[in-house]
């Protein structure tokens, strides 16, 4: 379904992704783990279409060239990214935002727009999934939300948008254990044979609740190891030290072996 | 600015006739404002110089347009003024117990004492106010007795259809709210034709003890015109003045407020939105004087400026000796949509009393790229995301307008009536 080949991404001449390969099949959940600065969030934004990166390589979703698309077209194609830092939009009503988003992708797909009554039903089901009260929809998007509420709002949006591929960027960061359970419960309820997920996290903790089919280790802009969920347990015990190459670009300069001193 | 006649308007008392003659002298003394006048610094001085004022016609030109399609739909009493003269056919001067709504012309003929303060020259240093005193002898007078709660808004519609000479028109509005009474007045300012000209509207408000007035100004004259609005307010004990202004039209749209908090415990709450395109200059001039103890005032204005438009927020808080316990706040938040747009924001605070709490703040920002990306990542097209963000910013100035028909008019005017 999603094929990423030799993906590179640079910002201001600093290369962050250095040839990333990943294949995600329908219904699969892939976890991407890695140390800080390894390029996890850049990968998520490269898939979602954030401007400001120089990007090379190929990314296809259901054979469509994702890198050629604007962010809104990627959403219409079925991409959804749960932000690590959801953006506050004062003055824009959460319900209106959600309905505009849903109807925008429906319109882009040539489907009819959803009416107010049907939308409310969809929204209520989504809210129940992440344990949100109704007044939540009448507030401005993320404005004044607590950290946990913002993350729940991301999953709420995902439940309304029903994406083909969800990319969840550090959805667990800043959550206490109760909030983590609610969010993981929401994500698990949205798993299905036609919906794939990429779960980006720094910690193994989230993967206790969302069990991945595959785990990848991202270090210095490349996937250096892939395995099943036991790889995450290994990382929990040993950290990333095994995978962090001493040849990293940002490692201190050392004289070449054998060079005259 | 020039005058097209040295014969002032007529009507009212001998004192008013003297004031008009004095106003003509004052116009000659003052001359047009210049860049050196802080309150007129960003005004288009060349265009102001081309304005001419003279006596209002007996009646304005007959309108062939559907006025109701361009103003909010309000069902209550209304007065329509065209080029400074009341259009009686289009007005609805309903009589309501405890409320007298009349034309300024009739008030001058029948009860001039009620509008006497409106024609006091005093030490006027605003040349356009002097012109209004000299030539403005029609408009609206709203007199509300004590202990009356009026829950339907009174609508005053001012229409400018500039002629050749004079190309400027003067209108007067006088509002008096009696003790323990409350009322809402909506002033809509529109215009027709693409000829150059200007409307000069002066509103005088007096609030007795415990009176409340909500006063809404909707300024949407054509962008070929100049619009000069001045609202002078005197507040008594524990009275409340709530001003909501929407400064949208005109080449130069100026909304000035001078509020005197003369009674202890009075409260003035002024807020508004200015939203400019093209080469518009939208100017908010606020002067609030705390002359009694324990009064509160709020100024909260939002500006959105696109293209080469210019916004001005010049907000004054003047706390007189003895006005202890003053609580005053001022804020001005702006969104610049183009790198050619400009905002000039300036607080002016003068505090000569003790135990005073004064706060002021201003912000200038652009559309948040991260928010745009966030919305686009949810499938919302870039143009729509931009529109949502701009409206979201502007709507925060619209939300607390209590009259649904006025809110609808504003959102329709701003191009987002589907929200």
Image (spheres, rainbow, N blue to C red):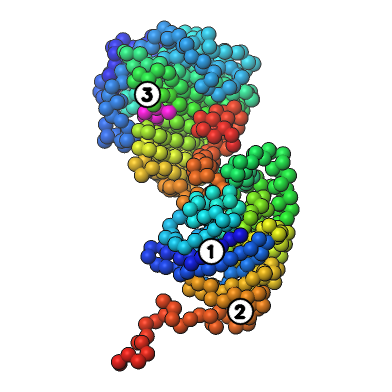
Name the residue nearer the viewer: B387 or A133: B387
Disc number for residue B254: none
Relative vertical location of residue B298 with respect to residue A127 in this rendering, above or below? above
Q: Nearer the viewer, mark 3 or mark 2?
A: 2
What is the chain identity of the residue bearing mark 3? B
Query: Which residue: 43% across, 10% down?
Result: B60
Disc 3 element: strand
User: Are labels 3 and 2 assigned to the same chain?
Assistant: no
Q: Position of A66 compared to B319: left or right?
A: right
**Callout 2 secondary element:** helix
- Real-space CA distance between mark 3 and mark 1, rounded to the nearest whole angstrom: 59 Å
Name the chain letter of the residue that bears numbered label 2. A
**A183 up-or-down from B71: above or below:** below
Range of residues picked out in magenta: B249-254
Check the image and name the residue furthest to the front: A63
Residue at mark 1: A4
């Amino acid at each position: 379904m999603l094929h990423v080949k030799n993906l590179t991404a640079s910002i201001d001449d600093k290369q962050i992704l250095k040839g990333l390969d990943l294949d995600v099949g329908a219904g699969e959940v892939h976890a991407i783990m890695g140390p800080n600065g390894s390029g996890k969030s850049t990968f998520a934004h490269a898939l979602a279409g954030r401007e400001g990166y120089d990007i090379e390589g190929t990314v296809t979703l259901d054979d469509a060239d994702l890198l050629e698309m604007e962010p809104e077209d990627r959403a219409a194609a079925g991409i959804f990214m749960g932000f690590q830092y959801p953006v506050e939009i004062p003055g824009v009503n959460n319900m209106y935002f959600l309905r505009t988003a849903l109807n925008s992708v429906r319109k882009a797909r040539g489907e009819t727009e959803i009416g107010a009554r049907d939308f409310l039903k969809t929204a209520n089901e989504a809210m129940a999934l992440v344990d949100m009260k109704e007044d939540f929809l009448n507030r401005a998007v993320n404005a004044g939300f607590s950290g946990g509420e913002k993350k729940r709002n991301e999953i709420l949006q995902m439940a309304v948008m029903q994406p083909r591929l969800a990319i969840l960027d550090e959805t667990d960061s800043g959550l206490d254990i109760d909030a983590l359970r609610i969010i993981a419960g929401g994500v698990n309820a949205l798993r299905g044979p036609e919906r794939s997920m990429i779960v980006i996290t720094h910690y193994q903790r989230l993967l206790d609740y969302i069990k991945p089919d595959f785990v990848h280790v991202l270090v210095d802009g490349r996937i250096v190891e892939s395995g099943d969920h036991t790889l995450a347990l290994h990382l929990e015990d040993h950290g990333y030290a095994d995978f962090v190459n001493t040849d990293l670009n940002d490692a201190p300069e050392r004289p070449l072996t054998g060079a005259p001193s | 600015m020039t005058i097209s006649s040295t014969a002032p308007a007529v009507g009212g008392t001998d004192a008013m006739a003297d004031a008009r003659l004095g106003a003509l002298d004052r116009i000659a003394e003052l001359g047009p404002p210049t860049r050196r006048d802080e309150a007129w610094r960003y005004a288009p001085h060349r265009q102001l110089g081309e304005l001419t004022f003279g006596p209002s016609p007996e009646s304005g030109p007959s309108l062939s347009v559907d006025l109701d399609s361009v103003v909010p739909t309000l069902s209550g009493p209304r007065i329509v003024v065209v080029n400074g003269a009341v259009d009686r056919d289009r007005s609805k001067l309903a009589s309501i117990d405890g409320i007298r709504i009349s034309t300024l012309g009739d008030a001058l003929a029948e009860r001039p004492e009620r509008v006497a303060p409106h024609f006091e020259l005093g030490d006027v240093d605003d040349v356009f106010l002097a012109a209004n005193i000299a030539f403005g002898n029609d408009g609206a007078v709203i007199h509300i007795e004590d202990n009356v709660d009026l829950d339907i808004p009174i609508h005053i519609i001012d229409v400018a259809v500039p002629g050749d000479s004079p190309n400027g028109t003067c209108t007067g509005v006088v509002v008096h709210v009696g003790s323990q009474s409350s009322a809402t007045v909506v002033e809509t300012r529109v215009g027709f034709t693409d000829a150059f000209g200007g409307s000069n509207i002066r509103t005088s408000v007096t609030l007795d003890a415990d009176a409340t007035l909500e006063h809404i100004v909707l300024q949407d004259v054509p962008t070929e015109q100049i619009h000069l609005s001045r609202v002078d307010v005197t507040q008594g004990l524990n009275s409340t003045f709530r001003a909501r202004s929407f400064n949208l039209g005109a080449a130069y749209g100026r909304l000035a407020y001078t509020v005197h908090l003369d009674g202890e415990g009075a409260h003035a709450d002024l807020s508004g939105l200015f939203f400019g395109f093209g080469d518009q200059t939208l100017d908010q001039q606020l002067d609030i004087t705390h002359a009694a103890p324990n009064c509160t005032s709020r100024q909260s204005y939002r500006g959105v400026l696109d293209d080469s438009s210019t916004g001005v927020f010049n907000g004054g808080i003047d706390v007189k000796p003895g006005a202890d316990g003053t609580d005053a706040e001022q804020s001005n938040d702006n969104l610049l949509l183009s790198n050619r747009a400009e905002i000039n924001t300036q607080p002016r605070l003068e505090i000569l009393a003790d135990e005073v709490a004064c706060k002021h703040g201003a912000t200038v920002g652009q559309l948040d790229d991260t928010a745009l990306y966030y919305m686009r990542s949810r499938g919302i097209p870039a143009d729509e995301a931009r529109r949502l963000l701009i409206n979201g910013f502007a709507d925060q100035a619209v939300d607390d307008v209590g009259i649904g028909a006025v809110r609808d008019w504003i959102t329709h005017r701003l191009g987002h009536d589907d929200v």
